[in-house]
């Protein structure tokens, strides 16, 4: 997510004076290229040149989800869904998928904790956004300042 939320958004911000479309495309390209280059530091087979190029192409879809929707959570879910299928195919191709046939219970517990934390964080962020809107509304400001 660093590729999209930091690098892509940073490049988009740097080029915002070039127009909305150019800055958006710059952010998308910067995020996708950096995501692909990151995979050189990944484990095989994802660190090979053809996989890095494939990751750059596939990451354009996540870039579009993030930059058009402006929702990091949607981008995370979308990216992890794509990654799940990619990793499963790589494990199957290498013959290592069988080693994951038994559940790893500590991992399941961690995932449940992360799930509930994400739901809590999302609901708190949404409530915060709603409250900010109401507090910034003209009539609410005038009402608060009268006390």
Image (cartoon, grey):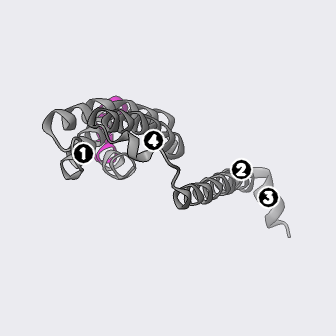
Number of other residues with Cα within 10 Å of mark 1, as a class: few under 14, some 14 to 19, many 20 or more: some
Label 1 element class = helix
- Region in magenta: 11-23
Query: Are the two marked residues, 2 and 1, in contact with CB atoms closer than 8 angstroms?
Result: no
Mark before the other along the chain sequence, 4 or 3 = 4
Q: Position of residue 120 (x, y in %)?
A: 67, 57
Residue in the image at 25% along x and 35% along y: 56
Query: Are the two marked residues, 2 and 3, in contact with CB atoms closer than 8 angstroms?
Result: no
Mark before the other along the chain sequence, 2 or 3 = 2
| Residue receiving disc 2 | 130
Q: Is residue 22 magenta?
A: yes
Check residue 80 in the rendering and tell me which mark sits there, or answer none. 4
Number of other residues with Cα within 10 Å of mark 3, as a class: few under 14, some 14 to 19, many 20 or more: few
Mark before the other along the chain sequence, 2 or 1 = 1
Front: mark 2 or 3: 2
Check residue 142 in the rendering and tell me which mark sits there, or answer none. 3
Whether residue 57 sits left or right of residue 70 in the image: it is: left
- Where, by quadrant of the figure, is residue 52 drawn? top left
29, 140: nearer the viewer: 29
Residue in the image at 49% along x and 46% along y: 72
Marks 4/1: CA–CA distance: 17 Å
Label 2 element class = helix
Marks 4/2: CA–CA distance: 28 Å
Front: mark 4 or 1: 4
| Residue receiving disc 1 | 34
């Amino acid at each position: 997510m660093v590729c999209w939320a930091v690098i892509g958004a940073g490049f988009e911000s740097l080029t915002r004076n070039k127009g909305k479309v150019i800055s958006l495309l710059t952010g998308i390209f910067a995020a996708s290229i950096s995501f692909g280059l990151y995979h050189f530091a990944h484990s095989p087979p994802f660190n090979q040149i053809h996989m890095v190029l494939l990751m750059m192409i596939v990451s354009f879809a996540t870039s579009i989800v993030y930059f058009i929707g402006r929702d990091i959570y949607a981008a995370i879910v979308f990216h992890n869904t794509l990654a799940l299928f990619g990793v499963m195919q790589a494990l199957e191709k290498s013959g290592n998928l069988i080693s994951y046939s038994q559940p790893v219970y500590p991992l399941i517990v961690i995932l449940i904790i992360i799930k509930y934390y994400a739901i809590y964080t999302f609901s708190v962020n949404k409530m915060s956004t709603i409250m900010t809107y109401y507090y910034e509304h003209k009539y609410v400001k005038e009402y608060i300042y009268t006390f």
